[in-house]
Image (spheres, rainbow, N blue to C red):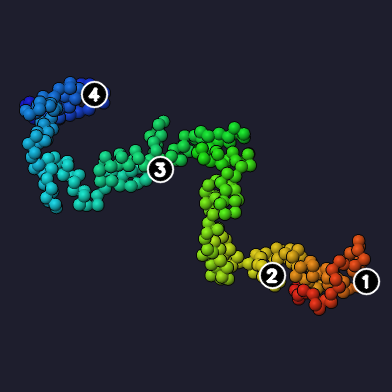
């Protein structure tokens, strides 16, 4: 075949995988190995391996910008620059961050994003969204407690931990002087002095300073608690918990089985049983409380449990 036949395949003599090139491509490729730059700029003398690169370079001297945007009319010296510019008129973002999946119109923007936003591991190609992720990846907890050996990612966390050993609470509330080991805990506490109870329960109207406390309280209304104490209104999920509450909080009389709202009322009531009282109080001749007629005590009619 003739020397100008570009359909012939040639194998690069130094290619280990015997990569094939068309004759014209092979001639350009060999220049990579030889370092030869035969196409010289007539203005500044800079050399190029390919004639097309020289043509683009010469436009930096002449100011020629033959590639015009059909949308806004802006012109460019290189076709590749026009292609990049066209993305400003479309939603195309071909360069996607493999860490957070954010898209970018320019490759350089992606490179900058990864360098600034994502921490890179120096041992492998892994990237992380923040410094904490990188430290966890490396298993690195550089700050160790000299007292117990526990290690931490951050120096501030180590300092807070050390206060557990020393008993210090250096962050003091200026209002009530209560101390805290961490500044964030103090800030949360200080709001209890300044904030109004702006979080109200839609069921009972009770108000709370912090939304989290309201959410915890709401569970007492929304959770299934069918066993309600008729004395204090406290509700329980399980009957056994309800029975235990009645026995501890609202004791009954062992003589007449009447139930009372508290132990003091029961003690006062026992005096009405006369001779039975000493057996209930073996160390005393009678209860300390003044005798009170059962009808005047805090007795309530409750079911037996």
Q: Is residue 46 left or right of residue 183?
A: left
Decide if residue 22 is on the left or right side of residue 133.
Answer: left
Dot 1 lies on which element? helix
Q: Which residue is mark 3?
A: 129
Classed neighbour count for the residue bearing mark 2: other residues with Cα under 10 Å, few (<14), some (14–19), many (≥20): few
Q: Which residue sits at x=13%, y=30%?
A: 50
Q: Earlier in the sequence, mark 4 or mark 3?
A: 4
Given residues 225 and 44, the one toward you in this image is: 44
- The residue beneath circle 1 is 275
Mark 1, other Cα within 10 Å: few <14 / some 14–19 / many ≥20: few
Q: Earlier in the sequence, mark 3 or mark 1?
A: 3
Q: Residues within 10 Å of mark 3 (few under 14, many from 20)?
A: some
According to the picture, the residue beneath numbered tag 2 turns out to be 232
- Distance CA(mark 4)–CA(mark 3): 40 Å
Ranked by sequence position, the earlier of labels 3 and 2 is 3
Q: CA distance from mark 3 to mark 2?
A: 52 Å
Label 2 residue SS: loop
Residue 84, quarter of the rendered image: top left
Q: Residue at x 8, y 40 (%)?
A: 64
Q: Residue at x 79, y 75 (%)?
A: 297
The numbered dot on residue 15 is 4
- Where residue 140 appears, x then y in whole percent? 49, 34
Q: CA distance from mark 3 to mark 1?
A: 79 Å
Q: Secondary structure at mark 3?
A: loop
Quarter of the figure that contains the N terminus: top left
Q: First in sequence, mark 4 or 2: give its number.
A: 4
């Amino acid at each position: 075949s003739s020397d100008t036949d570009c359909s012939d395949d040639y194998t690069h003599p130094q290619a280990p995988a015997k990569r094939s090139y068309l004759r014209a491509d092979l001639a350009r490729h060999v220049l990579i190995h030889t370092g030869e730059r035969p196409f010289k700029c007539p203005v500044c003398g800079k050399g190029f391996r390919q004639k097309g690169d020289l043509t683009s370079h010469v436009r930096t001297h002449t100011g020629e910008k033959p590639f015009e945007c059909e949308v806004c009319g802006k012109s460019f010296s290189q076709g590749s620059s026009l292609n990049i510019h066209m993305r400003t008129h479309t939603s195309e973002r071909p360069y996607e961050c493999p860490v957070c999946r954010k898209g970018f119109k320019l490759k350089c923007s992606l490179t900058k994003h990864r360098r600034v936003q994502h921490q890179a591991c120096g041992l492998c190609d892994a990237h992380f969204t923040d410094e904490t992720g990188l430290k966890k990846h490396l298993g690195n907890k550089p700050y160790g407690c000299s007292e117990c050996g526990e290690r931490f990612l951050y120096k501030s966390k180590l300092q807070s931990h050390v206060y557990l050993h020393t008993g210090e609470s250096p962050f003091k509330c200026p209002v009530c002087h209560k101390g805290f080991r961490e500044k964030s805990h103090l800030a949360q506490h200080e709001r209890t002095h300044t904030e109004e109870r702006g979080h109200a329960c839609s069921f009972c109207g009770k108000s709370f300073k912090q939304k989290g406390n309201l959410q915890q309280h709401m569970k007492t209304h929304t959770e299934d608690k069918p066993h309600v104490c008729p004395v204090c209104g406290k509700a329980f999920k399980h009957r056994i918990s309800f029975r235990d509450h009645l026995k501890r909080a609202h004791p009954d009389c062992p003589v007449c089985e009447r139930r009372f709202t508290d132990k003091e009322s029961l003690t006062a009531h026992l005096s009405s049983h006369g001779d039975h009282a000493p057996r209930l109080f073996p160390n005393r001749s009678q209860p300390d409380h003044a005798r009170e007629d059962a009808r005047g005590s805090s007795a309530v009619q409750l079911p037996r449990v």
